Image: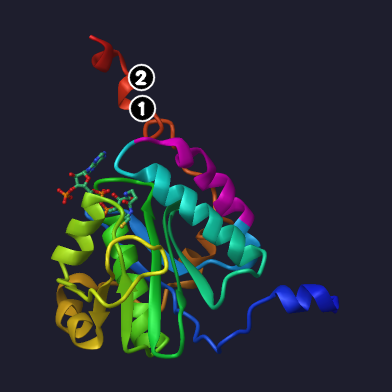
C-alpha cells in the first residue's frame, strides 16, 4: 500500500493500450526487435544512457540528459501516462523512444535516441512511436519538436509534419510540430515497417537488455589524434 503522501504525489493514470512487439530486418542483415520497456528495466536504461549525457556531438548530450530525467520520472511515478519503447539487437540496446499521452486525443513525443548509427534505427523507432500513438493508443495527433538538425530532417521533413504556432510543446522549445492521423497514414507505407508477431525465441533474446559497446560513439572528435593534427 502506498502511504497517503506518496499517493498524493503520483499522477492520475489513463488506460493505455500495450504496444505489440515487432521485428525489423535492418540494411546490414541484423534484426531489430522493437518492444515496450517495462518499468523494472528503467535502471538498466538509465545506466546505459548516463555516459551519453556529456557527449558533445549531434546533440546527444541534451537529448540523453532529458531522456534520462524522463525515464527517472517514469520510474519514480512523477510523469503522467509515459511509455518507453526499446530497439534491441541480439540482446543489446540499439535505441530508445519515449512519449506520453497528454490526454486521450493528444500525444506528446519526447525523445528518440539511436545508440547504433547508420542503420536508420532512430527513424524506425520514431516511426514505431508514431504507430503507437495513432494505431494503438488511438490518438488524433502527436506533438513533436526536434532538438537536432538530424531530428528535424528525419521527422519534420521526411513525414512531413506541419508546424502549429499556437501549440507550445512541453519541452518548451520551438513552436510544436504536429503529426495528424492523415499525415501518419500517408507516410505509413514509406516509413512504418516491421513484422508481427515476434517469434518467441527472438523476443526472449531481447531480455535482459544488455549494454552495447559505446566506446566508438563516446570518442569526442576533439580528443582524436586526427583532430589534434
Ligand atoms: C536523430 C537520430 C535518432 C536519428 O537516428 P537514425 O535514423 O538511426 O540515424 P543516424 O543517427 O544513424 O544517422 C543520421 C545521420 O547521421 C550521419 N551518420 C550516419 N552514420 C553515422 C555514424 N556512424 N556516425 C556519425 N554519423 C553518422 C549521417 O549523416 C546520417 O544521415 P543520413 O542517413 O540521412 O544520410 C540519431 O541521430 C540520434 O540519436 N541523434 C542524437 C539525439 C537526437 O538528435 N535525437 C532526436 C532529437 S529530435
Q: Quadrant of residue 163?
A: bottom left
**Between 133 and 152, the one nearer to me in the picture:** 152
The residue tagged 1 is 220
| Label 2 SS | helix
Residue 213 position (above or below residue 146): above
**Is ligand 1 less than 8 Å from the beta carbon at label 2?**
no
- Image quadrant occupied by the N terminus: bottom right
Residue 133 position (above or below residue 6): below
The residue tagged 2 is 223
**Between 42 and 180, the one nearer to me in the picture:** 180
- Image quadrant occupied by the C terminus: top left
Residue 91 seen in render: no
Residue in the image at 16% along x and 77% along y: 187
Residue at the limit of the structure toward the front, as seen here: 166
Residue at the limit of the structure toward the top, as seen here: 229
Residue 102 percent coordinates (x, y): 45, 81
- Number of marks in picture: 2
Q: Which residues are magenta?
A: 43-56
Taking the image as shown, residue 49 lies to the left or right of residue 73, namely left
Tags 2 and 1 in contact by the CB under 8 Å rule?
yes
Residue 97 percent coordinates (x, y): 41, 63
Taking the image as shown, residue 20 lies to the left or right of residue 116, namely right
| Label 1 SS | loop
Image coloring type = rainbow
Residue 104 percent coordinates (x, y): 45, 90
Spatial separation of the CA atoms under disc 2 and disc 1: 5 Å
Residue 209 percent coordinates (x, y): 55, 54
Residue 41 painted magenta? no
User: Which SS type dominates the magenta stretch?
Assistant: helix
Amino acid at each position: 500500500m502506498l502511504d497517503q503522501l506518496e499517493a498524493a504525489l503520483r499522477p492520475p493514470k489513463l488506460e493505455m493500450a500495450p504496444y505489440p512487439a515487432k521485428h525489423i530486418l535492418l540494411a546490414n542483415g541484423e534484426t531489430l526487435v522493437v518492444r515496450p520497456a517495462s518499468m523494472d528495466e528503467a535502471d538498466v536504461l538509465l545506466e546505459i544512457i548516463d555516459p551519453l549525457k556529456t557527449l558533445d556531438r549531434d546533440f546527444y548530450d541534451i537529448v540523453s540528459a532529458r531522456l534520462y530525467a524522463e525515464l527517472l520520472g517514469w520510474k519514480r511515478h512523477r510523469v503522467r501516462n509515459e511509455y518507453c519503447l526499446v530497439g534491441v539487437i541480439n540482446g543489446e540496446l540499439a535505441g530508445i523512444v519515449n512519449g506520453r499521452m497528454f490526454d486521450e486525443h493528444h500525444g506528446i513525443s519526447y525523445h528518440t535516441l539511436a545508440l547504433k548509427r547508420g542503420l536508420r534505427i532512430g527513424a524506425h523507432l520514431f516511426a514505431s512511436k508514431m504507430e503507437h500513438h495513432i494505431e494503438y493508443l488511438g490518438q488524433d495527433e502527436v506533438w513533436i519538436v526536434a532538438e537536432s538538425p538530424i531530428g528535424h530532417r528525419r521527422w519534420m521533413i521526411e513525414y512531413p509534419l506541419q508546424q502549429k504556432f499556437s501549440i507550445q510543446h512541453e519541452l518548451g522549445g520551438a513552436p510544436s510540430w504536429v503529426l495528424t492521423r492523415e499525415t501518419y497514414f500517408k507516410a505509413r507505407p514509406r516509413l512504418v515497417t516491421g513484422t508481427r508477431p515476434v517469434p518467441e525465441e527472438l523476443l526472449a533474446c531481447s531480455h535482459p537488455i544488455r549494454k552495447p559497446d559505446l566506446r566508438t560513439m563516446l570518442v569526442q572528435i576533439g580528443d582524436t589524434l586526427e583532430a589534434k593534427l
